[in-house]
Image (spheres, grey):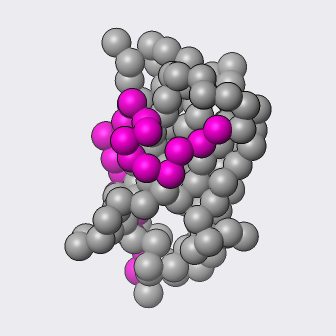
Amino acid sequence: QVQLVESGGGLVQAGGSLRLSCAASGRTMYTMGWFRQAPGKERELVAAITWDHGTYYADSVKGRFTISRDNAKNTVYLQMNSLKPEDTAVYSCAGTSTFRGSGWYGRGSSEYEYWGQGTQVTVSS
Protein backbone atom coordinates (compact mmCIF):
# COMPACT_ATOMS: atom_id res chain seq x y z
CA GLN A 1 0.00 0.00 0.00
CA VAL A 2 1.37 3.37 -1.01
CA GLN A 3 0.94 6.26 1.36
CA LEU A 4 2.02 9.88 1.36
CA VAL A 5 1.68 11.45 4.79
CA GLU A 6 2.02 15.19 5.17
CA SER A 7 2.72 17.28 8.21
CA GLY A 8 3.61 20.83 9.11
CA GLY A 9 0.70 23.01 8.06
CA GLY A 10 -0.89 25.58 10.30
CA LEU A 11 -1.62 29.24 10.95
CA VAL A 12 1.12 31.82 10.65
CA GLN A 13 1.33 35.58 10.37
CA ALA A 14 2.41 37.24 7.17
CA GLY A 15 6.18 37.22 6.93
CA GLY A 16 6.45 34.04 8.92
CA SER A 17 7.68 30.59 7.96
CA LEU A 18 6.40 27.06 7.86
CA ARG A 19 7.98 23.77 6.85
CA LEU A 20 5.91 21.04 5.27
CA SER A 21 7.01 17.42 5.16
CA CYS A 22 5.70 14.52 3.12
CA ALA A 23 6.84 10.98 3.85
CA ALA A 24 6.15 8.34 1.22
CA SER A 25 5.96 4.63 1.94
CA GLY A 26 5.28 1.58 -0.15
CA ARG A 27 7.11 2.69 -3.28
CA THR A 28 10.05 4.81 -4.25
CA MET A 29 8.93 8.18 -5.54
CA TYR A 30 10.95 9.61 -8.38
CA THR A 31 9.56 13.09 -8.92
CA MET A 32 7.64 14.66 -6.07
CA GLY A 33 5.78 17.90 -5.98
CA TRP A 34 3.76 20.22 -3.82
CA PHE A 35 0.47 21.53 -5.16
CA ARG A 36 -1.88 24.00 -3.54
CA GLN A 37 -5.50 24.91 -3.97
CA ALA A 38 -7.11 28.02 -2.59
CA PRO A 39 -10.89 28.40 -2.31
CA GLY A 40 -12.42 29.12 -5.70
CA LYS A 41 -9.14 28.57 -7.52
CA GLU A 42 -7.65 25.75 -9.50
CA ARG A 43 -5.00 23.49 -8.06
CA GLU A 44 -1.55 24.68 -9.02
CA LEU A 45 1.93 23.24 -8.87
CA VAL A 46 4.01 25.18 -6.37
CA ALA A 47 7.29 23.28 -6.56
CA ALA A 48 8.65 19.97 -7.77
CA ILE A 49 11.85 18.04 -7.28
CA THR A 50 13.30 15.23 -9.33
CA TRP A 51 15.13 12.16 -8.12
CA ASP A 52 18.45 13.85 -8.83
CA HIS A 53 17.35 17.02 -7.02
CA GLY A 54 16.44 19.14 -9.99
CA THR A 55 13.83 21.69 -8.94
CA TYR A 56 10.97 23.72 -10.35
CA TYR A 57 9.19 26.65 -8.70
CA ALA A 58 6.14 28.60 -9.64
CA ASP A 59 6.97 32.25 -10.24
CA SER A 60 4.81 33.27 -7.30
CA VAL A 61 7.03 31.45 -4.79
CA LYS A 62 10.51 31.79 -6.28
CA GLY A 63 12.97 33.12 -3.75
CA ARG A 64 10.61 32.38 -0.84
CA PHE A 65 10.01 28.62 -0.97
CA THR A 66 12.57 25.84 -1.10
CA ILE A 67 11.82 22.25 -1.96
CA SER A 68 14.20 19.49 -0.91
CA ARG A 69 14.19 15.76 -0.46
CA ASP A 70 15.86 12.94 1.39
CA ASN A 71 15.88 9.96 -0.94
CA ALA A 72 16.92 7.57 1.81
CA LYS A 73 13.79 8.51 3.74
CA ASN A 74 11.58 8.86 0.64
CA THR A 75 10.57 12.25 2.04
CA VAL A 76 10.11 15.66 0.49
CA TYR A 77 10.09 19.00 2.29
CA LEU A 78 8.80 22.46 1.47
CA GLN A 79 10.35 25.31 3.41
CA MET A 80 8.12 28.35 3.09
CA ASN A 81 9.52 31.71 4.11
CA SER A 82 8.17 35.26 3.86
CA LEU A 83 4.66 33.90 3.69
CA LYS A 84 1.92 36.08 2.30
CA PRO A 85 -1.86 35.93 2.79
CA GLU A 86 -2.17 34.85 -0.84
CA ASP A 87 -0.23 31.69 0.03
CA THR A 88 -3.23 30.52 2.05
CA ALA A 89 -4.41 27.22 0.60
CA VAL A 90 -4.57 23.50 1.11
CA TYR A 91 -1.16 22.12 0.24
CA SER A 92 -0.87 18.58 -1.05
CA CYS A 93 2.19 16.57 -1.88
CA ALA A 94 2.21 14.31 -4.90
CA GLY A 95 4.55 11.69 -6.20
CA THR A 96 5.16 9.45 -9.15
CA SER A 97 6.81 6.04 -8.94
CA THR A 98 7.24 5.99 -12.73
CA PHE A 99 10.69 6.97 -13.91
CA ARG A 100 10.23 9.25 -16.90
CA GLY A 101 13.81 10.28 -17.32
CA SER A 102 16.32 12.37 -15.49
CA GLY A 103 15.05 15.85 -14.85
CA TRP A 104 11.39 15.09 -15.54
CA TYR A 105 8.65 16.81 -13.61
CA GLY A 106 5.00 17.24 -14.40
CA ARG A 107 2.96 20.41 -13.94
CA GLY A 108 -0.42 18.77 -14.07
CA SER A 109 -2.18 16.91 -11.30
CA SER A 110 -2.86 13.95 -13.57
CA GLU A 111 0.84 13.31 -13.98
CA TYR A 112 1.23 12.16 -10.39
CA GLU A 113 -0.22 8.84 -9.26
CA TYR A 114 -0.03 9.29 -5.52
CA TRP A 115 -1.27 12.04 -3.27
CA GLY A 116 -1.19 13.03 0.35
CA GLN A 117 -4.29 13.99 2.27
CA GLY A 118 -3.57 17.72 2.16
CA THR A 119 -2.64 20.14 4.89
CA GLN A 120 -4.07 23.61 5.48
CA VAL A 121 -1.76 26.59 5.43
CA THR A 122 -3.31 29.85 6.57
CA VAL A 123 -1.40 33.12 6.49
CA SER A 124 -2.98 35.99 8.37
CA SER A 125 -2.35 39.61 7.46
- Say whether residue 89 is visible: yes
Residue 25 at what x, y percent from top left?
47, 18
Q: Quadrant of residue 123?
A: bottom left
Residue projecting furthest to the left: 40
Q: Quadrant of residue 15?
A: bottom right
**Which quarter of the image is occupied by the C terminus?**
bottom left
Up-down relation of residue 70 to residue 61 (above or below):
above
**Which quarter of the image is occupied by the N terminus?**
top left
122 displayed left or right of 47: left
Question: Which residue is located at x 62 percent, y 72 percent?
Answer: 59
Nearer to the camera, 32 or 25: 32
Residue projecting furthest to the bottom: 125
Q: Quadrant of residue 71?
A: top right
Residue 56 at what x, y percent from top left?
66, 54
Residue 54 at what x, y percent from top left?
74, 43
Question: Which residue is located at x 31 percent, y 40 percent?
Answer: 117
Up-down relation of residue 73 to residue 63 (above or below):
above
Magenta range is 104-124
Up-down relation of residue 105 to residue 98 (above or below):
below
48 displayed left or right of 90: right
Q: Is residue 122 magenta?
A: yes
Nearer to the camera, 53 or 22: 53
Q: Is residue 118 magenta?
A: yes
Residue 68 at what x, y percent from top left?
69, 43
- Say whether residue 6 is visible: no
Up-down relation of residue 96 to residue 43 (above or below):
above
Question: Which residue is located at x 38 percent, y 23 percent?
Answer: 3
